[in-house]
Image (tube, rainbow, N blue to C red):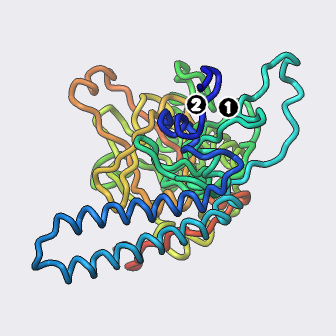
Amino acid sequence: MRTMGTMDEGTAAKNETDSGAADGVTPRGDVRETTAKKERARHRQNNRRRSSNATPNAGHNGEHAHSRALNQAAEKARAHENQGTERGRKSQAAEVAPDAALPEKVPGDPRKIAGAPLGKAQLAAMGKGVQYGRNTENFDPASTLVRPSMRILVGSPSAEKYDRPIKHDDVVIVPEFFCAENDWSLYYTLIEEMTAVQTGAREQKGSEWISWHEGAHLICKNPTGSKTFAMIQDRMGDYFGISRKSVGTRFNWYRDASDWKPFHHDSAAFNPHRAKNQNCTVGVSFGGERELAFLHAKDPDMKIYFPQKNGTLFFFGRDVNINWKHGVNALSYDEQLAQLGKGRISIILWGLAANCVDEAGSPPMLPYSGPRK
């Protein structure tokens, strides 16, 4: 007679769920061998069913199909066993001391009690058991140790420098980096200084506004006469550790809420000369809130939008620029009315961030057709 306080392997297997049941295996069993045997037995049973349902004329073909199925099952089982050790190596839990700051009376981890059943995630981390579930993509922690299409990070506006390694898949957002969201003083100061440079007795060459991207918005190619622009540019580069020798800049003005920016790659994605000195794009937004948008270069249905509020700093790495196009979304008619004619400035910096981490699997540069005409 079975007591209510115990559970044998058969009951555990019957009650298992994707949230962590033991797959009917105790820690003392040889899990890989048991899994392989079960898989071979399941394939034999399925093939016997198919064979019994086959017509007499299909006997010869049925024998070949049965043989192929058995061979495939055996190969799959062997591959599963061989991969177990490698999976276990990649996803092995690090042996570290417990957090000394935790309260002394925190209850123990029920997974570490002697004789406790192992869940599927635990088994997969050991290179044993099954990897997949009904509503689980993969129980193996090593399956997450891969590069993303894009990694979203948030930096601290109070820090002098970005305090973690930068990877080429990273998009970093730093809200209120230069000012509070509701403080528009820098926006208007930049416009005042640029106006003074453009209309002064010694008008600076290249400081005039130019229609850009087929009339989508305005740019100034030489805004260096603005002291505020120079201060902003230096602080942007310092935060991400960008060498000032490698810097290229752009002053964009979205004069009112009707201006926008079509999707495009920055030129370092396809220009070898630019790519030598540029592995990132950094920008800051002042004025009206807009959306920084990304469009996947190979999947036009994949779009990601980030809010760009007043004072927000953003960064994206080299491979983001290759794998994705970016732009600034247009506003609808009603959204334009709601912004009351307010514009937006974005100051862009391209350069070489020294602390970028190179990883295997980066995309190649895009085809280069020569300088624009």
Q: Quadrant of residue 190?
A: top right
Q: Quadrant of the C terminus?
A: bottom left
Between the C-alphas of marks 2 and 1, the distance is 7 Å
Residue 275 visible in image: yes
- Identify the residue at image location x=60%, y=46%: 25
Vertical arrangement, residue 7 with respect to residue 299, above or below: above
Label 2 crowd bin: few (<14), some (14–19), many (20+), radius 10 Å: many
Q: Quadrant of residue 368?
A: bottom left
Residue identifier under label 1: 157
Q: Quadrant of residue 274?
A: bottom right
- Identify the residue at image location x=54%, y=72%: 78
Given the image, on which type of amino acid does mark 2 rest? Answer: Pro
Q: In the rendering, which numbered label is found on residue 175? A: 2
Please state the horizontal and vertical placement of residue 145, each as a whole percent of the image: 61, 55
The residue closer to the viewer here, 365 or 61, is: 61
Q: Quadrant of the N terminus?
A: top right
Given the image, on which type of amino acid does mark 1 rest? Answer: Pro
Please state the horizontal and vertical placement of residue 20, each as a whole percent of the image: 56, 37
- Identify the residue at image location x=26%, y=79%: 63
Q: Is residue 256 left or right of residue 363?
A: left
Helix, strand or loop at mark 2: loop
The residue closer to the viewer here, 65 or 247, is: 65
Vertical arrangement, residue 77 with respect to residue 117, above or below: below
Helix, strand or loop at mark 1: loop
- Count of labels shown? 2
- Identify the residue at image location x=55%, y=36%: 12
